[in-house]
Amino acid sequence: MGTHARYRHKHFLLTSILALFLWVSGGYFIFSVAPTTIWVIVAFFLLISGALFLTTSLVLGNSRHGLLAVFMIIGYLLLRLLHQDIVVNMILLASLTITIEIYFRQKNK
């Protein structure tokens, strides 16, 4: 096993452990803290965003795709929080995510 392969394996392991920690922290947060203030809601979204980003980046193998997936999921959760989760908004959110992905693909060529 070369130095580069060892570094990648170590990086993957640390990222996996951090993602698991964030998921466990988020689960504990959901079940133990009542959403009474705006700061609790912000803390929830930060915990879930971190956990989703690390997980989707590991699963998809690309940080940019992971970040776009997180923006789409968090966007949906925010729309759901505001009672605006209708089909048209979901289509617009998906369209925006696809448009951003196409823009960055064209930019990298």
Image (cartoon, helix red, strand yellow):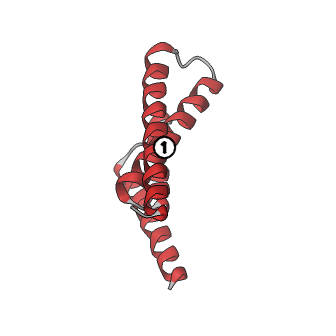
Q: Nearer the viewer, residue 58 or 40?
A: 58
Q: Nearer the viewer, residue 7 or 66?
A: 7
- On the question of residue 107 being in view, the answer is yes
- On the question of residue 89 being in view, the answer is no
| Label 1 environment density (alpha carbons within 10 Å; few <14, some 14–19, many ≥20) | few
Q: Residue at x 57, y 37 (%)?
A: 46
Residue 6 on image: x %, y %: 45, 56
96 in relation to 13, above or below: below
Residue 76 on image: x %, y %: 43, 45
Q: Residue at x 60, y 32 (%)?
A: 42
* Total numbered circles: 1
Residue 9 on image: x %, y %: 42, 53
Residue 32 on image: x %, y %: 48, 13
25 in relation to 109, above or below: above
- Residue, disc 1: 14
Residue type, mark 1 in image: Leu
Q: Residue at x 50, y 86 (%)?
A: 109
Element on which disc 1 rests = helix
Instruction: For the N terminus, give its image quadrant.
Output: bottom left
106 in relation to 46, above or below: below
Farthest residue, direction front: 1
Farthest residue, direction bottom: 109
Q: Nearer the viewer, residue 8 or 97?
A: 8
Instruction: Answer with the quarter of the image where residue 107 lies.
Output: bottom right
Q: Nearer the viewer, residue 108 or 61?
A: 61
Instruction: Answer with the quarter of the image where residue 43 lies.
Output: top right
